[in-house]
Image (cartoon, grey):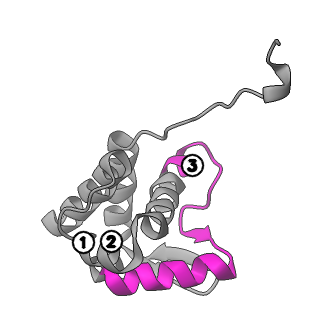
Amino acid sequence: MNIKIKELLNEMIQYKKERKPIKYLQKAFDEMGDREIYFPLSYLLSWHKAYFFGAEKPDRYEIEEVGSKRYALLFEKCPELKKVFSVHKDHIGWSANLSDEEQDEVRNYIHENFTVQIRIRRDASLKKK
């Protein structure tokens, strides 16, 4: 895997844990703020995790119009993302520059290094008084 792609993926994964940009995400963080990049990055990483469970298509992650604008801005502020992914009006796909083998490497790297946090909320109405 290309070293810059690996560094970007590592930063995306690290950002999910610490919410601090290191290198590639700094400009997007400065201009968009934490909340505007945290969730799109989460969804990009989760797309690849969900693929292993058969919940997502391997070649595209469906997005809505609101998400499309947020992703377009994120990709504009962090152009390194374009080396891995491509943003479209209704989905995120793979960069045309990545071979199928490279896509598998990226997907497997995310799967091995990114842990999805699951939060369970207790229904307040079930609490004993």
Q: Amino acid at mark 1?
A: Gln
Q: Amino acid at mark 2?
A: Phe
Quick check: 66 left or right of 25?
A: right
For this rendering, which residue is in front, 47 or 15? 15
Q: Whole-percent x and y of residue 110?
A: 37, 50
Dot 3: what SS? helix
Q: Is residue 52 magenta?
A: yes
Disc 3 or disc 1, which is closer to the eye?
Answer: 1
Label 2 – label 3 distance at C-alpha: 26 Å
Q: Residues within 10 Å of mark 1 (few under 14, many from 20)?
A: some
Quadrant of the rendered structure where residue 30 is? Answer: bottom left
Res 100 visible = yes
For this rendering, which residue is in front, 1 or 19? 19
The residue that disc 2 covers is: 29
Residue at point 40% right, 45% down? 111
Q: Whole-percent x and y of residue 126?
A: 83, 20
Give me the disc on residue 86: none
Q: Is residue 113 magenta?
A: no
The residue that disc 1 covers is: 26
Quadrant of the rendered structure where residue 20 is? Answer: bottom left
Please give the range of residues in magenta. Answer: 49-78
